[in-house]
Amino acid sequence: MDPAYSALVYAGFLACLVGFVSLLRPLKFLRISSRYRGPAVFGRGLLLILGVFSLPAKETWVQWPHALLDEFVAVYQFEEFHAIRVHAPRERVFQAIKEVRADEIFLFRTLTWIRRFGRPGPESILNAPENMPLLEVATKTSFLLLAEEPDREIVLGTLVAAPPGWRPKGKPTSAAFRAFDEPGFARDDCNHRNACIRDGCFDEKEICGVLAHNLSRKRADSRDVAARHSTSSRADVSLRRAP
């Protein structure tokens, strides 16, 4: 999400929190003198959040491809990027990325439990078993392995939304996944990439949300992807630190 949009969304959440607290005890230092003003503050915060989510998503074009991810995502509307410096050989960093488990990441299971509202469900990235690598869980369930360059980069993708009544035909492939750029489809592509220097490697992760091209669908899908990213970004940061 655009940084300005993100700031407005967080401001809206903050206003909702202030309004809710003011229902219990007016925050006079914020010039909320009575409980009756709490609902007004809460309502304004909610309107701000809904207003941002209703805005059309901005498109970003890749002009100079530098990673495998760019071959699958030439244009996107949402992006996250995380990087951490790891003092280890490229091979060990890449191996750690592929072998890290849910129980090795601080608060991962807690955050995914919150994400699914505490509901039980089938095995997935949101309900990962403790003894299985997360990338293995992802590719066995909702994610597709799109490309891999040994010891350098791995690219995954999943569908966030599809047109009503659409059903996949045959076994999913990376070539078929590229075609999901028509109106009504929303994709979520991500990669892990090692950028090594003399005394260590930078473990990088980039997430790109590719949405439908018609405006009405774009607005609906932007809310889905924005919510998806806002709840998963902490888990992504934790994963960066696991090696």
Image (cartoon, grey):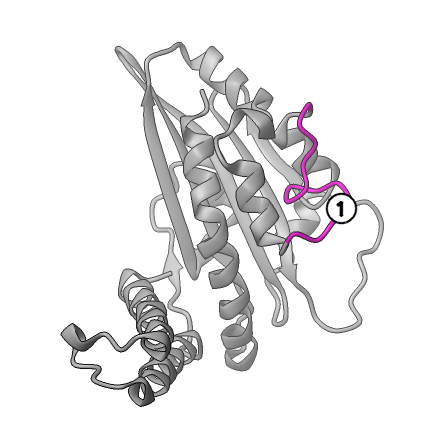
**Where does the magenta region start and end?**
118-131
* Residue behind mark 1: 172
Is 122 magenta? The answer is yes
Task: Confirm whether the magenta stretch covers residue 216.
Answer: no
The percent position of residue 104, horizontal first and vertical second, equals 54, 24
Q: Is residue 198 left or right of residue 122?
A: left
Category of crowding for the residue at label 1, using alpha-carbon neighbours closer than 10 angstroms: few (below 14), some (14–19), many (at least 20):
few
What type of secondary structure mainly makes up the magenta span?
A: loop
- Helix, strand or loop under label 1: loop
Q: Residue, x 40% and y 52% (percent of image)? A: 79
**Vertically, is 93 above or below 212?**
above
Check the picture and name the quadrant holding the C terminus.
top left
Q: Is residue 226 above or below residue 216?
A: above
Taking the spot 63% from the left edge, 71% from the top edge, the residue there is: 184
What x and y, as percent, mark residue 51? 39, 81
Q: Specify whether 97 is left or right of 6.
A: right
Placement of the N terminus among the 4 image quadrants: bottom left
Q: Classify residue 93 as left or right of residue 212.
A: left
